[in-house]
Image (cartoon, rainbow, N blue to C red):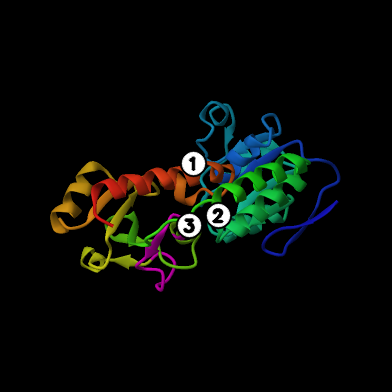
Amino acid sequence: MQYIDQMGHQIELTHPPRRIISLVPSQTELLFELGLDEEVVGITRYCIHPRDKCRKKTVVGGTKKFNFEVIEELQPDLIIGNKEENYPEGIKILQEKYPVWMSDVVNLQSALEMIAKVGELVQRIAEAQELAVMIKRKFSQLKFIPKIPVAYLIWKNPYMAVGGETFINNMLTHAGFINIFQSTPRYPQIELQDLKTARVILLSSEPYPFQDEDVKGITQMYPDKLVLQVDGTMFSWYGSRLQYMPSYFINLRRQIASSIPL
């Protein structure tokens, strides 16, 4: 069977994959959600959910640095990666030896397409379609008013925020926020002085693990704003975790509404 990934590359599989390596945490979680406990043989060190299953799998390096020797030992018949999370040079090397299917996810629609396409790849079509339908239904029920100006920070020293044309920016929109950096490049470097127009400042748990002291520091600078730590996976993981995001957004909005006048 021939398959075309979300970057337009074509791969060919002669049989349903039985030895899969996932190079993306959110897609690793998706594979387990689809019931591929035995078929997944390799993951990255950042693949941590579900914990009980990930800890039993072989680690093949990070998302930006693969251990090619370990990958060779695993003899995968399918590798699943992502355009943004993996590095082109490493992916090119893998493509010369193995079928590598790449996702390119920038919004909810492309995430749902990825889920459906992965379902086809791994012969879990019905399960993937059911999951995608459920996720789409839950997101359709989100109707947040008013829209809140927000800044979403992902890094410190230097500070970096989420800009436009990113999956996180799209999730912020679904959560009823207006990203004050949506007209900037994908992940702009900023100064704290640039946060003046935000009503709420969200500090992500990943890739930089913001702590309570970060909340206190920014709150001291902006006592009129609400500064919150948030679960980064609930804004950036575009696999099966999408099913939990709408309820997370609802609870987050309730927390904000109880803290500041809207």
- Relative image position of residue 9 (x, y in whole percent): 73, 62
| Up-down relation of residue 135 to residue 18 (above or below) | below
Q: For residue 46, which numbered disc appears in the image?
A: 1
Q: How far apart in space, not on screen, are marks 1 and 3 (Cα)?
A: 26 Å
The reply to whether discs 2 and 1 touch (Cβ–Cβ < 8 Å) is no
Residue 196 drawn in magenta? no
Question: Which is nearer the eye, 255 or 4?
Answer: 255
What amino acid does circle 3 point to?
Answer: His
At mark 2, the secondary structure is: loop
> Which residue in the structure is indicated by mark 3?
174
- Relative image position of residue 218 (x, y in whole percent): 19, 54
Question: Which is nearer the eye, 201 or 89?
Answer: 201
Q: How far apart in space, not on screen, are marks 2 and 1 (Cα)?
A: 12 Å
At mark 1, the secondary structure is: loop
Residue range highlighted in magenta: 173-187
> Which residue in the structure is indicated by mark 2?
86
Task: Give neighbour class at mark 1: few <14, some 14-19, many 20+ (Cα, 10 Å).
Answer: some
What amino acid does circle 2 point to?
Answer: Asn
Which badge, 2 or 1, comes first in the chain's sequence? 1
What amino acid does circle 1 point to?
Answer: Tyr
Is 43 on the left-hand or right-hand side of 259? right
Task: Give neighbour class at mark 2: few <14, some 14-19, many 20+ (Cα, 10 Å).
Answer: some
Q: How far apart in space, not on screen, are marks 2 and 3 (Cα)?
A: 26 Å
Which badge, 1 or 3, comes first in the chain's sequence? 1
Question: Which is nearer the eye, 105 or 65?
Answer: 105
Frontmost of labels 2 and 3 is 3
- Relative image position of residue 14 (x, y in whole percent): 86, 46
| Up-down relation of residue 113 to residue 245 (above or below) | below
Is 254 on the left-hand or right-hand side of 124? left
